[in-house]
Image (cartoon, rainbow, N blue to C red):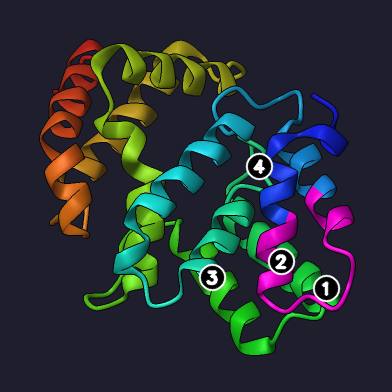
Amino acid sequence: MPTETHPLLKDWNALLTRCGATADPAPYGRDLLERWAEPQRRYHTTAHLAAVLGHVDGLAGHAEDPDAVRLAAWFHDAVYRSDRSENEERSARLALRALRDAGLAEELTAEVARLVRLTVTHRPEPGDGNGEVLCDADLAVLGGPPQAYAAYAAAVREEYGFVPEDAFRAGRAAVLRQLLDLPALYRTPEARERFDAQARVNLAAELDTLGGS
C-alpha cells in the first residue's frame, strides 16, 4: 500500500502534531512506513506496528505519557535487519534525529529513545509505566491464540531464512527459554490477565517443537 494513503499515516500526523511538532509530520510518517514495509521483513512489518499501537491504546491508562509510548512504538523496529544485533540502538538514534528535526521537546525525544532501547531486554524497572506499556504491547503476540502464534513463529523463521536449521533451532530455543525465565512476561495487570497464561503455553509448545524443552 502506498505510504501516502496508508491508514496509519493519519494517526501518525495527528500524534506528531499533538506532541508539538513544528514541521510537517507527513514526510516523517512516510519514511517510517517505508521502513516498516521493507522487503526483508516478514514479522516486523506494518501489521506488527499496527498491532503494537493498538495494544498501546488498550494499555494507555497505565502509562505516564501514552503519546511518548506511541512514538516509541512507531520507532521501536524502524531499523530492522535480522542479520544485525544493533537494530534497537539504530532505531533509537533514528528517533532522536527525526523527532529533534520535527521540533519536539528534548525531554520527550529522549524518553522515546529510552523506550526504544528498552525493547532490547523487555525488562522495565518497577514503576516505569511507559516502559511497561511498550514492552507488554510488543510482547502481546506471544499470548495470542495458537494459530496466530504459529503464524508469528513461521514469519520469524522466514526473517532468519539465511540461518541453517540447526543453528536457528538452537538460537530460537535460547530466546524462548530466556522469555520463559523472565520474572514476569507482562508487567501491566491488564496484559498479565489477558496474555500471560496463553503466552507460556505457546512458548513451551514452540520450545518443544525445537527440541529445546
> Where is residue 54 shown, x and y percent of the image?
45, 44
Judging by the rendered image, the residue that carries numbered circle 3 is 68
Question: Dot 2 lies on which element?
Answer: helix
Q: Is residue 208 left or right of residue 171?
A: left
Q: Nearer the viewer, residue 70 or 147?
A: 70
- The answer to whether the residue labelled 2 contacts the one labelled 4, judged by CB atoms less than 8 Å apart, is no
Residue at 45% x, 57% y: name it. 119
Q: Is residue 122 left or right of residue 163?
A: left
130 within the magenta span? no
Judging by the rendered image, the residue that carries numbered circle 2 is 16
Over which residues does the magenta segment extend? 13-29
Residue at 48% x, 23% y: name it. 156
Kindly identify the amino acid type of the residue bearing the numbered disc 4.
Tyr
Distance Cα–Cα, label 1 vs label 2: 8 Å
Q: Earlier in the sequence, mark 4 or mark 3?
A: 3
Q: Which mark is residue 102?
A: 1
Question: Dot 4 lies on which element?
Answer: loop
Question: Dot 3 lies on which element?
Answer: helix
- The answer to whether the residue labelled 1 contacts the one labelled 2, judged by CB atoms less than 8 Å apart, is yes
Distance Cα–Cα, label 1 vs label 3: 15 Å
30 w.r.t. 103: above or below: above
* Foreground: disc 3 or disc 2: 2
